[in-house]
């Protein structure tokens, strides 16, 4: 099944100066304003995420299996123990879903996460791959009935919001060492 993998699309300025000598592919950019998902999307994401609760370890494993299968070029970015990485991913999604009701706490969390990802050479171009993989993993874990068109639309809106905040924070970082040591 094809998913809409259109991210919060950055528009790159021609001949823009590089943000950092350490991140040559990431140019100064402008992007559409980050929009908070509507209440229907938030509710749908929170309800579907509750169904993931009992299968969190499997969901993390499914995500990385799909990520490395479709995007093998990113495998080298993950140097740590993959079970620990899977756990961290699920914890961050869990926190992101739970904090959708508290954007004043969610946004600083997402900004810090975006800044940490600079250290691992995360590029803006990686965000659509993560979105595609997350949607596929959720559909696999929850089934097509649960991850119907409305659920995919809701998750897409929430992911675009998360990614927009993280990308914005990444753009503020000049050096890869500005983030903390955790992904």
Image (cartoon, rainbow, N blue to C red):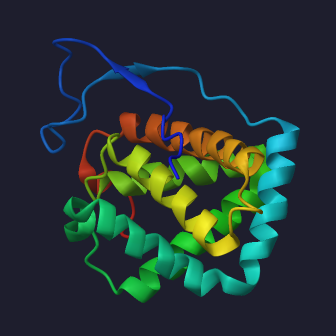
Work out whether residue 2 can be spotted: yes
Position in image of residue 142 (x %, y %)? 69, 71
Position in image of residue 100 (x %, y %)? 77, 51
Image quadrant assignment for residue 33? top right
Q: Residue shown at 29%/57% (left/top)?
A: 119
Position in image of residue 90 (x %, y %)? 59, 73
Query: Would residue 35 be found to the left or right of residue 119 on screen?
Result: right
Q: Residue shown at 87%/41% (left/top)?
A: 40
Q: Is residue 151 above or below residue 167?
A: below
Q: Is residue 142 above or below residue 86?
A: above
Between 106 and 131, the one lying in front of the other is 131
Quarter containing the C terminus: bottom left
Q: Is residue 90 above or below residue 157?
A: below
Q: Is residue 163 above or below residue 143?
A: above
Query: Would residue 27 be found to the left or right of residue 30 on screen?
Result: left
Query: Would residue 129 be found to the left or right of residue 27 on screen?
Result: right
- Number of labels in the image equals 0
Image quadrant assignment for residue 175? top left
Query: Would residue 16 be found to the left or right of residue 39 on screen?
Result: left
Q: Residue shown at 87%/51% (left/top)?
A: 43
Position in image of residue 104 (x %, y %)? 76, 44
Outermost residue, front side: 1
Between 104 and 55, the one lying in front of the other is 55
Between 40 and 119, the one lying in front of the other is 40
């Amino acid at each position: 099944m094809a998913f809409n993998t259109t991210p919060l699309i950055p528009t790159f300025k021609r001949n823009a100066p590089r943000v950092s000598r350490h991140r040559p592919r990431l140019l100064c950019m402008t992007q559409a304003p980050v929009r908070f998902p509507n209440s229907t999307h938030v509710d749908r994401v929170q309800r579907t995420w509750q169904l993931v609760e009992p299968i969190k370890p499997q969901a993390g494993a499914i995500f990385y299996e799909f990520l490395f299968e479709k995007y093998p070029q990113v495998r080298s970015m993950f140097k740590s123990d993959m079970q620990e990485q899977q756990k961290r991913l699920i914890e961050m999604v869990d926190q992101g879903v739970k904090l959708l009701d508290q954007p004043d706490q969610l946004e600083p969390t997402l900004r810090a996460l975006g800044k940490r990802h600079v250290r691992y050479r995360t590029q803006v171009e990686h965000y659509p791959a993560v979105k595609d993989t997350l949607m596929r993993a959720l559909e696999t874990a929850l089934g097509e009935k649960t991850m119907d068109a409305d659920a995919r639309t809701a998750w897409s809106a929430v992911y675009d919001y998360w990614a927009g905040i993280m990308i914005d924070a990444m753009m503020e970082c000049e050096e890869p060492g500005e983030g903390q040591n955790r992904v």
